[in-house]
Amino acid sequence: MSYGQPPQQGYGQPPQQGGYGQPPQQGYGQPPQQGYGQPPPQQGGYGQPPQQGYGQPQGYGQPQGYGQPQGYGAYNAPAPQAQSADPARQWFDAVDQDRSGRIDARELQAALSNGGFRFSAAVAEKVLKMFDRDRSGGLSFMEFKEAHQFIKQMSDGFKSRDRDGSGVLEGPEVRAALQASGYQLQEGTFQIMMKKFDHEQVGGLRFDDYIALSIQLGTVRNVFAFYDRQRTGQVTFNFDSFFTAVLTCS
């Protein structure tokens, strides 16, 4: 199965580098420096922060407020109370079914799946680990707000690329998103990537596949940046350092 045409450019610019001595510890436990739909890095190189949120294509609409019925956040939201009530808190309380004060992977999957897209348990777990800053196994209120913003902006990016409204990004649409984010992959690499993340073999990426790919790319890019200390876009590995990089990205 072929997923699109070859890119017209070579390898893109890598992003912000982690510290020295050890590879970045993010794994997929930290947000990528740039999401899909994000313009390529500025010429300043690794150190420049992204200009927009995760997955937010340039010029696309602003994220909705937390707790609004559209898109993500429509999880059995309680009836509005006083105008001073925090809608994000109301939505958090609605999702926190066991009243533990934290959102676990099962609750997060249910909330995200209720937003109009299928959302696998595996990807919900990746998102949870990405924002679980204190490694408690669940999302606090503030962590949940960050995760909500990430998913909402990724949803906007996905919908802006899904021109035919099929709910699946086909090869050319995925390639355009990658190139807009500064990823210029060779054809062989692109095909392997698509086969790996096209979990249902539909010829493209569903939204949760798109999220999983974005998280993986951000992780790989951060690890590569750690080893590319001369900012050349190329690194040399011995077996030990290569194995360490693979484990960090897994």
Image (cartoon, rainbow, N blue to C red):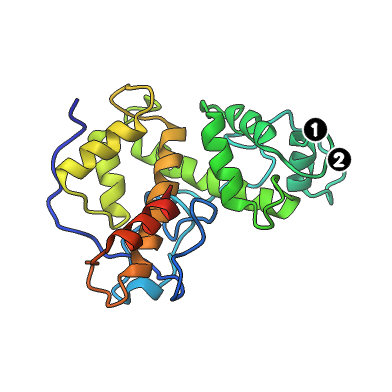
Identify whether 95 is placed above or below 64: above
**Residue at 41% in and 58% down:** 34
Q: Position of residue 2 (x, y in %)?
A: 18, 29
227, 57: nearer the viewer: 227
Q: Residue at x 70, y 45 (%)?
A: 138
> Looking at this view, is 208 or 53 the one in front?
208
Q: Is residue 152 left or right of residue 105?
A: left
Labels 2 and 1 touching (C-beta < 8 A): yes
Quarter of image, res 192:
top left
Q: Disc 1 marks which residue? A: 78
- Visible in this render: residue 58? no
Instruction: State the residue position of label 2.
Output: 81
Q: Is residue 62 visible?
A: yes
Tell me the crowding category of disc 2: few under 14, some 14 to 19, or many 20 or more residues within 10 angstroms, Cα based.
few
Residue 36 percent location from the top left of the image: 38, 49
Please say if 143 is above or below 110: below
